[in-house]
Image (tube, rainbow, N blue to C red):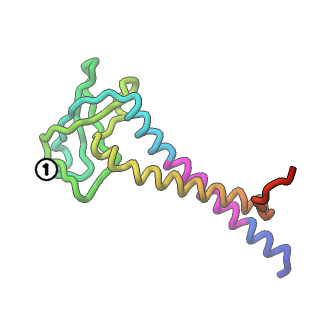
Amino acid sequence: MGEEETKKTGNRYSIILLLVGLFTLLLSGTFLGRQLALDLFGTPTTGVVSSKYGSQTKSPVIEFTTEKGEHVTFRSWHATNFIVYSAGSEVDIVYLPAYPKIAEVRLLGFIGYPDDIGWFCLGSLLTAGGLVAVRNKTITIDLRRKSK
């Protein structure tokens, strides 16, 4: 059990850290990118909370009609413990005209931004840490002024 075995174990942990970071970055980037696309390119409209999943829900199922007349039903990706939607109530939503199944309740999308950004930053830090650990070299940051 020498130095070589310790290096293998350390390298294994750094690869695991890198993979966890990449997974977190990819997943959170998907959620954040989806919400940004909805806010930048989405079409706002109103929808009605469906009664398919009980009379009250925290992650609502919404039915709406697009500008082209297509009837769409979707379930919100975000859920909260402090906002409850009753069946039959109208809510403001936003959807992508190219693919209307990508839609979200506007309020829940805005509430979800801090979570999405936080997870994206955490994934970035874990990925950077994993890359540094896999590299297996120390990083030196020299902040001295260069003399002319």
Q: How many marks?
A: 1
The spot of residue 22 in percent (x, y) is: 60, 52
- Residue 29 horizontal side relative to residue 136, left or right: left
- Residue 53 horizontal side relative to residue 75, left or right: left
Image quarter hosting the N terminus: bottom right
Q: Nearer the viewer, residue 72 or 36?
A: 36
The residue depicted at 78 percent of the width and 69 percent of the height is 8
Q: Residue furthest front?
A: 148
Please tell me whether mark 1 sits on a helix, a strand or a loop.
loop
Per the image, is 64 magenta? no
Q: Residue furthest bottom?
A: 1
Q: Amino acid at mark 1?
A: Ser
The residue depicted at 19 percent of the width and 52 percent of the height is 84
The spot of residue 69 in percent (x, y) is: 25, 19
The residue depicted at 83 percent of the width and 53 percent of the height is 146
The spot of residue 143 in percent (x, y) is: 75, 59
User: Which of the 4 image quarters holds residue 80?
Assistant: bottom left
Is residue 80 positioned above or below 34 on the image? below
The residue depicted at 27 percent of the width and 44 percent of the height is 107
- For the record, the magenta segment spans 12-28
- Give the residue number, with chain letter if any, for mark 1: 55
The spot of residue 34 in percent (x, y) is: 43, 38
Per the image, is 22 magenta? yes
Instruction: Give the main secondary structure of the magenta stretch.
Output: helix
